[in-house]
Image (cartoon, rainbow, N blue to C red):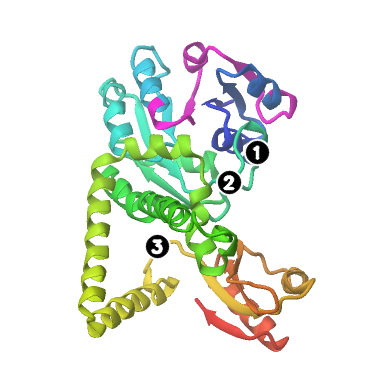
């Protein structure tokens, strides 16, 4: 019987515990956390079998150890594990949002012959803590793996343990990971927060101010609502990458500023055209063998039950959604509903179903 220790029972840790318990009910899961209330909740809701505040002791008997805290805690945990006599075939993994820092911290452990596999599930929620976890949190989300020197057998064992998460696995190097998440996650969070802060200052003397914010502004700045403490830690653990990307972004803004000042319409048109072309080509047909998602955009009227009518049709046809998002909806104006599917067959069936029901397809894939 495999014993899995999950250190850190926040959103990610307890969601992994739930998924493992769902897929492998025979596995013994030991939940480790410094918060007694989190341990009590986890044991009460039976997604862990045992609980402890003594991570070092629990790690000695584990076949798999999952480090599910912030990166700063993960690196400290790795230092602790390097001082222990672990089981020879133990697999240690993490869920940290930066990987170069974590992989460097794992080297003393790896030098002892212990298998470490870096990991990062690209999933989250506006909620946090042990009570927010759910087994389907990761379904159809990308899950980065950084095997390092780990064997293919060990990677396969970890993937099999986490099979019930239903994630899309991506194997990358630490540098690739940090560069990708820096550009596609870390930088956008900084930009969104900066835009909200700048707008608040710019409209501070307006009686209506941000109350007029709708549509595009809300869509662009949605991620500015993320946890400030968490994002401070993330940026401080990926500084070189994020600073470089911020400098490049600032240079792009400077170029646009120069074009506006010079009245250079051609440069501005080229700027927007390049962006539109790139954004319009984000569809799955351009991703090769990369696991992907399939989007469908439809117009929906601003009336009660409009969204429910769409989802009901999909449910009756047994077509499963990965995600749903409302774009630029205002009173008495049609909105755009973005529907995301996990595979091409489901996407194409949804297109045919909704088109037959006279929904206006704005864009597909």
Task: Judge left or right: residue 337 versus residue 54.
Answer: right
Kindly identify which numbered label has been placed on residue 157. none
Is residue 261 shown above or below 56? Answer: below
**Residue that badge 3 annotates:** 290
Q: Left of 272 or right of it: where is 353?
A: right
- Which mark lies nearer to you, 3 or 1? 1
**Residue span colored magenta:** 43-72
Residue at the disc numbered 1: 132
Which is nearer the N-term, disc 3 or disc 2?
A: 2
At a point 50% along the width and 52% down the height, the residue shown is 223
Tell me whether the residue at label 2 lies in contact with that at label 1, contact meaning CB atoms closer than 8 angstroms. Answer: yes
Q: Is residue 61 magenta?
A: yes
Q: For mark 2, does the 10 Å Cα neighbourhood hold few (<14), some (14 to 19), or many (20 or more) residues?
A: few
Q: Looking at this view, is 316 or 221 the one in front?
A: 221
Q: Position of residue 208 (x, y in %)?
A: 58, 61
**Quadrant for the N terminus in the image:** top right
Residue 248 spot, x, y in % from top left? 23, 57
Contact (Cβ within 8 Å) of mark 3 with mark 2: no
Residue on which the image places disc 2? 125
Mark 2 or 1, nearer chain start: 2
The reply to whether residue 154 is in sight is no
| SS at mark 1 in the image | helix
Q: Name which quarter of the figure residue 235 lies in.
A: top left
Q: Is residue 346 visible?
A: yes
Q: Report how far apart the C-alphas of labels 2 and 1 lie in the structure.
A: 8 Å
Between disc 3 and disc 2, the foreground one is: 2
Residue at the image point whose x is 62% and y is 41% from the top:
127
Distance (Cα) linking label 3 and label 2: 24 Å
Crowdedness of circle 3 by 10 Å Cα count: few (<14), some, many (20+)? few
Mark 2 secondary-structure assignment: loop
Residue 155 on the magenta span? no
Q: Quadrant of residue 119?
A: top left
């Amino acid at each position: 019987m495999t014993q899995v220790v999950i250190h850190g029972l926040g959103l990610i840790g307890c969601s992994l515990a739930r998924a493992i318990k769902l897929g492998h009910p025979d596995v013994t899961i030991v939940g480790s956390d410094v918060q007694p209330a989190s341990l009590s909740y986890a044991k009460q809701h039976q997604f862990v079998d045992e609980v402890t505040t003594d991570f070092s002791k629990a790690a000695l008997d584990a076949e798999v150890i999952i480090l599910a805290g912030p990166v700063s805690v993960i690196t400290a945990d790795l230092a602790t594990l390097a001082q222990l006599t672990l089981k020879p075939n133990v697999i240690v993994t993490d869920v940290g949002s930066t990987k170069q820092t974590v992989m460097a911290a794992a080297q003393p452990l790896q030098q002892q012959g212990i298998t470490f596999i870096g990991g990062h599930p690209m999933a989250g929620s506006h909620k946090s803590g042990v009570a927010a976890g759910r087994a389907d949190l990761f379904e159809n989300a990308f899950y980065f793996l950084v095997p390092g020197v780990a064997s293919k057998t060990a990677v396969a064992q970890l993937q099999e343990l986490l099979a019930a998460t239903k994630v899309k696995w991506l194997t990358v190097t630490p540098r690739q990971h940090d560069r990708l998440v820096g550009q596609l996650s870390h930088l956008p969070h900084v930009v969104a927060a900066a835009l909200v802060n700048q707008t608040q200052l710019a409209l501070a003397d307006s009686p209506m101010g941000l109350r007029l914010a709708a549509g595009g502004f809300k869509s662009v700045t949605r991620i500015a609502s993320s946890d400030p403490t968490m994002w401070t830690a993330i940026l401080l653990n990926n500084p070189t990458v994020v600073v470089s990307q911020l400098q490049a972004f600032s240079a792009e803004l400077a170029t646009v500023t120069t074009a506006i000042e010079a009245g250079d319409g051609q440069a501005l048109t080229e700027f927007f055209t390049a962006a539109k072309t790139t954004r319009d080509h984000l569809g799955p047909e351009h991703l090769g063998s990369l696991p992907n998602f399939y989007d469908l955009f439809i117009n929906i009227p601003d009336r009660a039950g409009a969204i429910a009518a769409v989802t009901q049709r999909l449910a009756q046809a047994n077509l499963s959604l990965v995600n749903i998002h409302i774009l630029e909806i205002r009173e008495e104006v049609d909105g755009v509903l973005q529907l995301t599917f996990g595979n091409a067959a489901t996407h194409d069936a949804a297109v045919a179903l909704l088109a037959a029901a006279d929904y206006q397809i704005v864009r597909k894939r």
